[in-house]
Amino acid sequence: MTLDIRQVGEPVLRQRARPLTLGEIHSTPIRSLIEQMRDTMRQAPGVGLAAPQIGQPLQLAVIEDREEYLEGIAPAILQERERTSVPFHVIINPRLTITDMSPALFFEGCLSLDSFAALVPRAIAVRVDCLNEHGEPMVIQARGWYARILQHEIDHLNGTLYIDRMLSRSFMSIDNLTKHWADKTMRHLQTVLDLPELGSPRA
């Protein structure tokens, strides 16, 4: 069973989600919710889905960057993004720490802003302390595209969307991104779109 994904403008997307208790994590409703979120993310398809996106203000997100999503992407682009496949997993009550403030700039989309994308500066590496779906402590050390996914999903849990962090001149439809910009280097994009030089991204 899949769930409806809330679109920008829904109040739940601008609220700070509440933590889950261990009792809730082990409950049947939360286990069922995780399965439904996984199925919804895969059907979309997407690489992450936070509970607020399906109307639940909970500190819970699912993440998966499947091998098939990388097919057809040029090796140079994958290398530039430091993108590799990430197996399915759950993060609950996450605490994010930036471990390398070096800014990385790439396009992001969002299932709650259907059909749009923009360049978003993110930290290149992060640490996430959280619980897994069994309520067990877990530490994630991530960099590159995986670090970007984690920052994006944890933003959702704090009521933040990528449009709050994007370089506004780069905001565009997915169709135009695919048509005009997908194969361009970040340096080319910055020059043509007259984007500012990056400093350190916001934590």
Image (cartoon, rainbow, N blue to C red):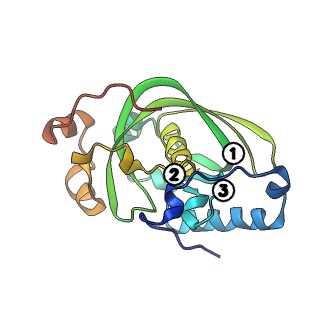
Residue 24 lies in quadrant: bottom right
The answer to whether 107 is drawn above or below residue 196 in the figure is: below
Q: Amino acid at mark 1?
A: Asn
Residue, x 44% and y 67% (percent of image)?
A: 7
State whether residue 73 appears in this view. Answer: no
How far is the residue under mark 1 from the one under mark 3? 8 Å
Q: Neighbour class for label 3 at 10 Å: few (<14), some, many (≥20)? A: some
Q: Neighbour class for label 1 at 10 Å: few (<14), some, many (≥20)? A: many
How far is the residue under mark 1 from the one under mark 2? 14 Å
Q: Which residue is mark 2?
A: 159
How many numbered tags mark residues here?
3
- Where residue 177 is drawn, which disc sits there? none
Residue 12 image position (x, y, % from top left) = 54, 62
Residue 75 image position (x, y, % from top left) = 38, 40
| Mark 2 or mark 3, earlier in chain | 3
Residue, x 58% and y 56% (percent of image)?
A: 50
Residue 129 image position (x, y, % from top left) = 68, 35
Q: Which residue is mark 3?
A: 58
Horizontal side of residue 132 vs 202, given as left or right: right
Q: Amino acid at mark 2?
A: Gly
Q: Amino acid at mark 3?
A: Leu
Q: Secondary structure at mark 3?
A: loop
| Mark 1 or mark 2, earlier in chain | 1
Residue, x 58% and y 45% (percent of image)?
A: 86
Residue, x 63% and y 48% (percent of image)?
A: 87
The residue lying toward the viewer, choosing from 83 and 6, is 6
Between marks 1 and 2 in the image, the one whose residue lies nearer the viewer: 2
The answer to whether 136 is drawn above or below residue 46 in the figure is: above
The answer to whether 82 is drawn above or below residue 21 in the figure is: above
Q: Which residue is mark 1?
A: 93
| Mark 1 or mark 3, earlier in chain | 3
